[in-house]
């Protein structure tokens, strides 16, 4: 139950990230926003890391040296953070020649990509039921996105391919690669230490790119809206989500984390309807059918029902074993 609550919290925070990031467009470029939130999150997590070490009686300088003592670990986290930064850059480039609706729809392919990557790279073989669950989840998320879009616009809500969509497909692949690579290499460090490494190398990746192409001179540093939004993005949708992701990928696995991303469009739709007092958008047939598809997909992907069913079959089979065989084993 704790894992489920943490997964839902992660999905809710991710949904709020999309909403607040949209608000930031009035104050700074996407690149500048991403770089600044990574940098602030890094500054916030360092004292948290030092406090956690002192609580357990560890020496902070020694622990910092240990974090950077293995070359392989550094290369792993350079890759982990690089794939995440690559996703953000791909998203920004794609939005120059595509629509937010298209990126939202294509984002639903990330879990399926994650399954393929985990199969090829980690050797994880997903069952046919679980793969079918991912397909149903993608379908449900698309239905929710299109139903939410149709209630906000009077034009067509059909999906039309744009040139930026090809770029975003590559960005989604990098995001799926990021989650799977955290599962592969993230077990070597505690969640807080792993999040620190991602933020550190993510900042190092973003800083030179932002200084060149981030339009720093256009950032509205003097406006309170900039600081309120950037602080929320830093604390809740960067610092907290990174720590949660590090912990959940290790405990629940990348598959469950990716599956829970199907609920993100639902949370966005709920927030939009509440902010606009248009509750009817949550009662239409398309939204409800999409929500049902997502719920069914999560049940199929999680496999709890099928695990219990298999256990019942084993119990039945053991009861059906002839008594003579029991006597011999005794």
Image (cartoon, helix red, strand yellow):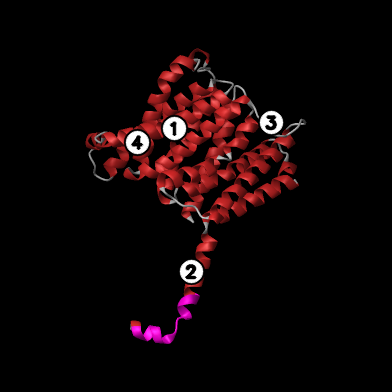
Magenta region, mostly helix, strand or loop?
Answer: helix
Question: Does residue 22 lie above or below 330 as drawn?
Answer: above
Horizontally, residue 77 falls left or right of residue 225, namely left
Cα separation between marks 1 and 3: 27 Å
**Between 280 and 133, the one nearer to me in the picture:** 133
Instruction: Classify residue 152 by image quadrant.
Output: top right
Q: Tell me the SS state at disc 4.
A: helix
Is residue 302 rendered magenta in the image? no
Mark 1 crowdedness (10 Å alpha carbons): few <14, some 14-19, many ≥20: many
Mark 4 crowdedness (10 Å alpha carbons): few <14, some 14-19, many ≥20: some
Which residue is at 46% across, 42% downward? Answer: 117
Give the label, 3 or 2, closer to the camera.
Answer: 3
Which residue is at 32% across, 41% downward? Answer: 52
Q: Earlier in the sequence, mark 4 or mark 1?
A: 4
Residue that mark 3 sits on: 160
Residue that mark 1 sits on: 83
Residue that mark 4 sits on: 76
Q: Is residue 240 visible?
A: no
């Amino acid at each position: 139950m704790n894992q489920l609550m943490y997964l839902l919290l992660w999905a809710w925070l991710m949904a709020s990230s999309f909403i607040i990031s949209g608000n930031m467009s009035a104050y700074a470029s996407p690149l500048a926003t991403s770089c600044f939130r990574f940098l602030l999150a890094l500054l916030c997590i360092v004292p948290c890391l030092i406090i956690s070490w002192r609580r357990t009686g560890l020496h902070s300088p020694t622990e910092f040296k240990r974090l950077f003592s293995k070359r392989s670990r550094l290369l792993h986290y350079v890759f982990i953070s690089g794939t995440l930064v690559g996703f953000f850059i791909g998203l920004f480039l794609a939005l120059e020649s595509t629509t937010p609706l298209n990126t939202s729809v294509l984002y639903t392919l990330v879990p399926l990509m994650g399954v393929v990557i985990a199969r090829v790279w980690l050797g994880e073989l997903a069952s046919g039921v679980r793969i079918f669950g991912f397909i149903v989840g993608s379908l449900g998320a698309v239905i929710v996105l299109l139903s939410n879009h149709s209630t906000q616009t009077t034009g067509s809500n059909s999906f039309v391919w744009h040139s930026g969509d090809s770029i975003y497909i590559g960005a989604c692949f990098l995001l799926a690669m990021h989650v799977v690579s955290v599962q592969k290499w993230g077990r070597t460090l505690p969640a807080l230490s792993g999040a620190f490494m991602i933020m550190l190398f993510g900042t190092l990746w973003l800083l030179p790119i932002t200084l060149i192409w981030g339009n720093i001179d256009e950032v509205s540093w003097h406006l309170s809206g900039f600081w309120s939004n950037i602080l929320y993005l830093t604390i809740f949708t960067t610092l907290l989500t990174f720590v949660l992701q590090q912990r959940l990928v290790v405990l629940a696995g990348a598959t469950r984390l990716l599956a829970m991303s199907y609920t993100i469009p639902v949370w966005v739709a709920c927030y939009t309807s509440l902010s606009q007092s248009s509750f009817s958008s949550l009662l239409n047939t398309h939204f409800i059918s999409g929500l049902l598809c997502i719920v069914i997909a999560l049940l199929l992907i999680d496999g709890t029902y099928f695990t219990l069913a298999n256990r019942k079959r084993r119990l039945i089979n053991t009861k059906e074993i002839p008594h003579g065989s029991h006597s011999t084993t005794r």
